[in-house]
Amino acid sequence: MLEFLPVRNVEASEAHLQRRRVKESVDRLNIGFRVERHPELWSALAETGEHFDDAVCMAREIDAVWDKLELKGISREKMMLCALLHDVGKAGPEKRSTELHRAIKQLFAPPRKPFNPFRQQNGRTVPKTIRDFMEETEMRGAFEVEAVLEKELKIKSDAKPIIDFWRDHADWTYDLLSHHREGEVDDDVVTIASTHHVLEGRNPAHVPLDDIHPGSKVLELMDKYQTLAMIDKYQAFRGRGGLDHEKAIEALRRIIEANKTLDTVAKQEYGRIIDVLASSEEELTETLVRPEITEPTVLQRAPRRSMAA
């Protein structure tokens, strides 16, 4: 007679395997980040599932084009760490119940059928709500998801746009990294990692974007979070959007050109970063192939010593 493990035992086993997989992936990056020394971040990364795989690809993309980026005042390893941690908030807010985590995981999972988060209404483009998303994608357990969102986050699914909910992860990333700021996870990592949706108006680190003058901290960090923002979008267009390299680059250029909040200096810097990506098709395409993770691996090169710039 077949015997089945209780659901909690199965989930605990899956969590253990995912944590091990995260550690192996982080070790393969050779950035000197000991994820086991940050247990809360380790767990959160494991809970983000395939979004963690995307973050690893982003870190590899930064590694692949590092010499062309010519970023000053930050090491390759630290910039790769920012990429690795930028979506850790997709596990949800730090104080999350098991039920909330399950709900958030469902809402961040790629839908089973194509979904456009906007619709035309009376000649205007308006965002669809969380409920619209769940109904159109035929999400299982939608009633339970709505209930837990309202109970724990005070979110009404028929009112909050799904695109805004998805972008909430930048705030959750900031909160989680801020509360576990230690060792390699320093102030710059917290700010750069959580500011990757600044083009969409998400600025959880409260970077004073109007304080861009020679010598300012904002100017010092600007090319770093701009780089992360562009590589994040490039990864989304290639990995999840299915665009080829040329179309992904065209989409990036349209986003920057259409943004009315960027001044000339900012647009020029975004343009420079996009030019770097445009000239790196072969290197970037190689990073999209995810390595198989099996048993703990022997690193092929000596560990990097430090994340100091």
Image: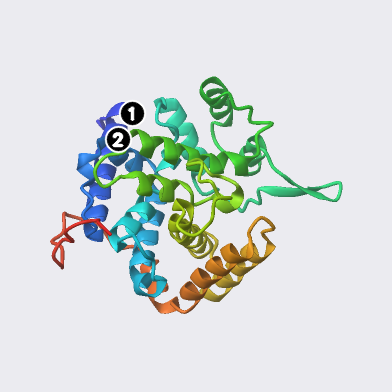
Q: Which kind of residue does numbered mark 1 sit on?
A: Val
Furthest-right residue in this view: 122
Residue at (38% x, 44% y) in the render: 190
Residue at (70% x, 49% y) in the render: 118
Quarter of the C terminus within the rendering: bottom left
Question: Which class describes the residues within 10 Å of circle 1: few (<14), some (14-19), or many (20+)?
Answer: few
Q: In this view of the protein, which residue sits in the foreground, 241 or 153?
A: 153
Residue at (67% x, 38% y) in the render: 129
Percent position (x, y) of residue 15? 29, 38
As measured in the structure, the alpha-carbon distance from the residue carrying label 2 to the one carrying label 1 is 23 Å
Percent position (x, y) of residue 10? 29, 33
Question: Which class describes the residues within 10 Å of circle 2: few (<14), some (14-19), or many (20+)?
Answer: some
Residue behind mark 2:
40
- Tell me if residue 89 can be seen: yes
Q: Which kind of residue does numbered mark 2 sit on?
A: Glu
Percent position (x, y) of residue 243? 55, 68
Total label count? Answer: 2
Q: In this view of the protein, which residue sits in the foreground, 213 or 56?
A: 213
Residue behind mark 1:
7
- Tell me if residue 14 can be seen: no
